[in-house]
Amino acid sequence: MTRQVPGNAVTTPAKGLLPTLVRWVDADHLPEGPEAMLAAPKEVDWARCVPFILLHLACLGVLWTGASPVAVWTAVTLYFIRMFAITGFLHRYFSHRTFSTSRAFQFIMALWTATAVQRGALWWASTHRHHHRHSDDPEDKHSPVVDGFWWSHVGWITAKRNFPTDYGRVPDLAKYPELVFLNRFDVLVPVLFFGALYGAGAWMESAGVATSGAQMLVWGVVSTVVLFHGTACINSLAHVFGRRRFLHTGDDSRNSLLLSLITLGEGWHNNHHRYQATVRQGFFWWEFDPTWYLLKALSWTGLIWGLKPVPASVYAEAAGAADVAGTAEEAEQSA
Ligand SMILES: [Zn+2]
Ligand SMILES: [Zn+2]
């Protein structure tokens, strides 16, 4: 078990390219020890950026493969299917346990989220739990308030200090070896996923459909890159743009309809920072939260259950906040 340690600790992480290269395949290969990595300075690890940059450059492949309706619609569909996995499963299940499920469906959720290419569910959840513990303080891994837009959007994921999975933060998940396996070899599912896209494209081409393996692969990559930036918007923008209903969350989290449209409901971030244990992020019917609607529908199948609601006390607080906001607006108008 490891715990996060302050960034100014004196331990030095091991130098050299080899451990970084091995970690592209085995995310738990930490010869210098997780404590040393967690104590590394807040800085970009350029070797770690290579796969990330290659993924972006691969989008230029559309210049060679071109577009087709089937490839573009696959990319759009994959964006939403995988955004749902990120918000419904990585965030609302693995990070916050806002509903219950079976061990078998938990594994299916972990596989589904792995196709989003945002590393393993345990890394994602441990990182996110750390964010709630340190929101907008200097220890926060991705605070736009403390470290600016670029660091909170993308810089932080390349830093050595943010690479190891802090298994001590996710003991409830680390007890499942199948989840730890997927988390450790987090490149496995993405490789199979992209391979399947190529295979599907090649098969459709042989069946006379106007696409190809390369075209489906490239548009799958485009979808994945857009998906990354859509998700990253919550880190970089949801603490900067929008309204604050709950003023005493101890951070700068905000509510934004625009960010909710991009992320299937994650834009109600101030609501979420106020009360993390509910499956809902839009607390009212007019706060568009498609992930909540989909999880509700999923509960009717019996695959998930025990969806945690917003407590009455939080609704009462929201009503009080509206009164306070109303009073402030009236005061402004009469001034
Ligand atoms: Zn959260
Ligand atoms: Zn936040």
Image (tube, rainbow, N blue to C red):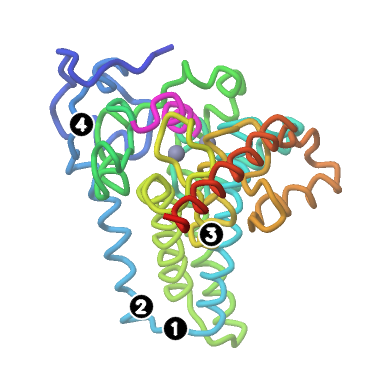
Q: Residue 202: image x %, image y %?
A: 52, 74
Residue ID for mark 1: 67
Residue at the image point whose x is 49% and y is 62% from the top: 258
Of the residues under marks 3 and 4, which one precedes in the sequence?
Answer: 4
> Could you tell me which secondary element the residue under label 2 belongs to?
helix
Q: Residue 75: image x %, image y %?
A: 51, 70
Tag in front: 4 or 1 = 4
Residue 42 badge: 4
Of the residues under marks 4 and 1, which one precedes in the sequence?
Answer: 4
Residue 257 badge: 3
Of the residues under marks 1 and 2, which one precedes in the sequence?
Answer: 2
Q: Residue 107: image x %, image y %?
A: 66, 36
- Disc 3 to disc 4, how far (Cα)? 32 Å
Residue ID for mark 2: 62
Vertical position of residue 96 compared to residue 91: above or below: above
Under mark 4, the amino acid is Lys
* Discs 4, 2 touching: Cβ within 8 Å: no
Q: Quadrant of residue 277?
A: top right
Q: Is residue 14 left or right of residue 99?
A: left
